[in-house]
Amino acid sequence: MSPAVEVFAFPVAIAALSLVGLTLALFGDGLYDFCAWLGLALPLASVLWAMLRALNRPP
Amino acid sequence: MLSARTIRRWSWVHTWSSLVCTVFLLMLCLTGLPLIFHEEIDAALNPGIWSPTSSDRQVTLDQLLVQALAARPGEVPVFMSFDDERPVVNITTAPRADAPQSAMHFSSYERNSGASVPPADRGAAAMHFILQLHMDMFLGLPGMLLLGAMGLLFSAAVISGVVLYAPFMRRLDFGTLRVTRAPRIKWLDCHNLIGIVTLTWVLVVGLTGVMNTLAEPIIEIWKARELGDLIAPHAGRAPAAKRSSLDTAVQAAVAAAPDMRLQFVAFPGSAYSTSRHYAVFLHGATPLTAYLYTPVLVDAVDGKLVGLRAMPWYVKALALSRPLHFGDYGGVPLKVLWAGLTILTLVVLLSGLYLWLVRRADGRSPHDGPFAAP
């Protein structure tokens, strides 16, 4: 993989899925809202994941 | 990868665009947090304040209007709006139809019985203060436009931050937080990670916020162009002194667009109408079109339909930028996520400020260190 692809793979995926989430909730209720929550929870979940990983890793 | 010179240029953009807007963004995030939950806060502070009375009476809109005006002698009607979730009509009155918002009085009535619905005003003053600070810092249009400019600078800071993310993360895995290193390294990692994962959300909320700061000029353009076009054939008619029935006007408007729902009425002389017409605003019935308004003009003297016209793209963009800024279009969980993302944005702002301060104390340029110490 090229360095740029490696650096931006996760960020682009998270950005795209957040955008899908932001848009979906505009188009409907119920399942649309639920998918929107998942998409927008991704940024928060990835920060949580990184924090837990950093704290559990031996120095 | 970027050359050292290009990186320095982007660093300069990132540092200065952020520094100028950070204090405003901190205020916007802190005031935005309670505003996300304003419906829930209003409901919690004013519990059980209204329950529908069972009544067989059927009052007309004209009767409601007479009732509202009797309670406010010397005032004229400005707006009448219709709640979506409950059968309640809200009537805004003021000394003049074009009076500023601060001079307007708001009262609510049951649609069927005409019984007064008590205002949910506990905590309203505090929420209003927060909203005003968030919208224009009590400076009116200049304040709104200043905040809009800060929103544009913030977007420049976010985009330059994305460009700088690549050289910073060259030798690091996604999500690396070097928590055991010096505070500067630790907070740099936090800043980079949180900044990049919140990218889409901050850009959407930031740019829709900028759009909202342009609301007043946008409405003025719409009035001059579209509304002006619609009434051109009827130009030169005197302002409506003696008015025709409001119920007839609303019925005519609803009949003109049967698949739409009634949203609000702007009375003659108010900001959203002309001196001669009732402007009846309808909105769509699907989740997406519910945000999009269509005005129907009805002559306020003879009660005849003048016409309706779909909003131009720039008013539609303004209408859609509201839910996307407020986060109120996907239930309470969406609001909680909105709050979580606002808090993450605060962490990015504060860690950015901290990184700038420690760099300055070191006497180095803000962005030459991390490359040497991966």
Image (cartoon, coloured by chain):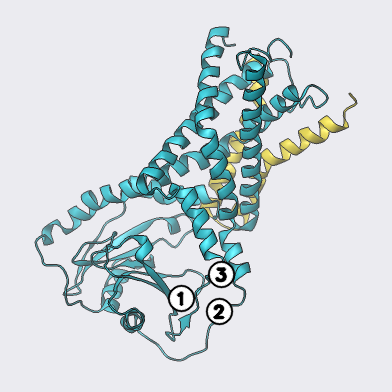
| Label 3 chain ID | B
Q: Looking at the image, is B163 positioned above or below residue B131? A: above
Q: Secondary structure at mark 1?
A: strand
- In this image, B218 relative to B368: left or right? left
Amino acid at pointer 3:
Arg
Q: Which mark is residue B50?
A: 2
Chain A, chosen colour in render: yellow
Tag nearer the camera, 2 or 3: 3
Residue annotated with mark 3? B122
Q: Earlier in the sequence, mark 1 or mark 2?
A: 2
Quarter placement of the N terminus of chain B: top right
Quarter placement of the C terminus of chain B: top right
Q: Earlier in the sequence, mark 2 or mark 3?
A: 2
Q: Residue at x 56, y 81 (%)?
A: B51
Q: Circles 1 and 2: CB distance less than 8 Å?
A: yes
Residue annotated with mark 1? B88
Q: Is residue B330 visible?
A: no
| Label 1 chain ID | B
Amino acid at pointer 2:
Trp
Q: CA distance from mark 2 to mark 3?
A: 14 Å
Tag nearer the camera, 1 or 3: 3
